[in-house]
Amino acid sequence: MFTGIVEEVGRVKSGGRGRLTISARKVLEGTKLGDSIAVNGACLTVVEMTDGAFSIEVMPETERRTSLGSLRPGDPVNLERALAVGARLGGHFVQGHVDGTGKVLSLAPEGSAVLMRVSAPPPVMRYIVEKGFIAVEGISLTVVHRDADSFTVSLVGFTREHTTLSAKRSGDPVNLEADIIAKYVEQLANPGKSGLTAEFLREHGFA
């Protein structure tokens, strides 16, 4: 589980054959083999560590659902270690399970902020609501507007300076993860489509 608050921007050192090696500093502190690190919003397992870098394996399913397969040496990536018990939750609950990719449609200044409009596929758009959460490239952001097939978020200066979003341009792909709470609400509202029901939650002490 993650919060969507990026800890640092690393850089791809090498990639190929379903494996990425990424240079980093902060996220290596306290990290050991088998730990999870979110890379541009995708939860991945550390399989090797060296001085100032770590390696992760990218499964075919991950390549299909994310933009990680297009990363090249030198590309910047957003990095976040898994949420520690007792830590502050500054963003929202992010699983690191990317639902799909969207595309940056436009970037427009608004005062000291920048409005970024992003397209999203229907399976993601159904969970997006104004003032709700969305993870873009692993970053917890608040939706300020939505229409039929896109949404807009407002990027403050700190977010632009400390993530890869400052380098995004119109047409760039971005990884998207909808709020997990919205998915559960939908399942509960349509119990016939899933084994998850209000009765099940009560029986198992969740409600």
Image (tube, helix red, strand yellow):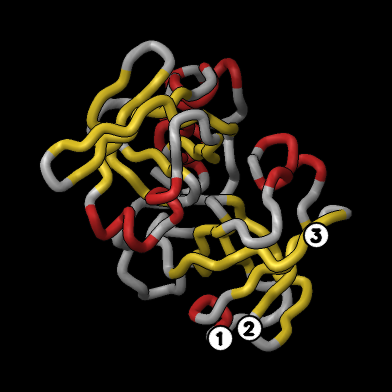
Contact (Cβ within 8 Å) of mark 1 with mark 2: no
Above or below: residue 69 compared with residue 21 = above
Above or below: residue 86 compared with residue 168 = below
> Which residue is identified by label 2?
52
Q: Earlier in the sequence, mark 3 or mark 2?
A: 3
Mark 2 burial class by Cα count in 10 Å: few <14, some 14-19, many 20+: few
178 or 139, nearer to the observer: 139
The residue under label 1 is which amino acid type? Gly
> Which residue is identified by label 3?
19
Provide residue 140's location: percent of width, then percent of height: 37, 49
Residue found 68% across the figure and 88% down from its top: 51
Q: Secondary structure at mark 2?
A: loop
Query: Whole-Å distance between the Cαs marked 1 and 3?
Result: 22 Å
Residue found 46% across the figure and 26% down from its top: 188
Q: Is residue 170 visible?
A: yes
Q: Secondary structure at mark 3?
A: strand
Residue found 64% across the figure and 41% down from its top: 67
> Which residue is identified by label 1?
30
